[in-house]
Amino acid sequence: MKDFVIIGHKALTTGDFSLNDLPGSAGRMDILCRCINSALFLSHGMRRDVNVHLVLLGEPDPGKIVRFNGEQLRYLSPDERSSGSLIKKALEKDATEFESQSTPGVWIRRGGLEKLLAEFAGKNRSIYYLHEEGKDMRVMQDLPDDAVFILGDHMGVTEEEESRIKAVSAGTLSIGPLSLHSDHCIIIILNELDRRSGHQE
């Protein structure tokens, strides 16, 4: 499985938001929805070997992780409202330290970036931080198929978060000289991995 971690600094952490106003009422939840769709959808199918972890740090109850698992996922359509609806349903559950499933393939629990990083590091997963000043992904010869990629939202990544990521990461990756939207980064990363594996749909 490939894992994408997206940090939502302002994303609302209860289900009390309007699907008609994901950018405003939900703290830029629209960005996270686009990342979900970019990571999971193909033209005529879905990537079953991808997990998307949304680290939600907004008010009023910060510190929740919503995970989308491509292998088990159901009821997701390729639009922001659909993924927003599944996030909303997850946030309506009482989150604990242990994952609970809200709908098929969507899970929620309490936690933040530090918890995820510790879990991935404990499993000896290769963690990569995405930044335009990192090493060009295209010249890396040993990028594993089960890598973990960490991305920020429209606010980027804080200095504290960057320090924590770099402490356990295998390196900082760049997909180009310019700063891109997180959902665009995900598409480019997956395209590069597809080309390396010779995968054809």
Image: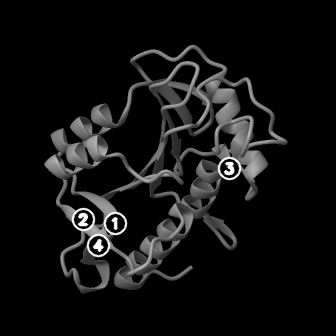
Going from N to C along the chain, the mark reached first, 3 or 4, is 3
Nearest the viewer among 178 and 39 is: 178
Disc 3/disc 2 C-alpha distance (Å): 26 Å
Q: Mark 2 or mark 4, which is nearer to you? A: 4
Residue 75 appears in view: no
Q: Is residue 120 left or right of residue 3?
A: left
**Picture coordinates of residue 34 (x, y %)?**
64, 57
Residue 101 appears in view: yes
Q: Given the current orientation, which residue lies at the most extreme right position? A: 20
Tell me which residue sits at (29%, 72%) in the image. Answer: 133
Vertical arrangement, residue 56 with respect to residue 23, above or below: above
Quadrant for the C terminus, please.
Answer: bottom right
Disc 4/disc 1 C-alpha distance (Å): 5 Å
Residue position for label 2? 172
Tell me which residue sits at (72%, 46%) in the image. Answer: 23
Q: Is residue 57 left or right of residue 88?
A: left
Dot 1: what SS?
strand
Disc 3/disc 1 C-alpha distance (Å): 21 Å
Q: Are marks 4 and 1 in contact (CB under 8 Å)?
A: yes
Q: Are marks 2 and 4 in contact (CB under 8 Å)?
A: yes
Residue position for label 4? 133
Going from N to C along the chain, the mark reached first, 3 or 2, is 3
Quadrant for the N terminus, please.
Answer: bottom left
Dot 2: what SS?
strand
Tell me which residue sits at (60%, 45%) in the image. Answer: 73
**Kind of residue indicated by mark 3:** Asp
Q: Residues within 10 Å of mark 2 (few under 14, many from 20)?
A: many
**Disc on res. 30:** 3
**Picture coordinates of residue 198 (x, y %)?**
40, 85
Q: How is the image coloured?
A: one colour
Going from N to C along the chain, the mark reached first, 3 or 1, is 3
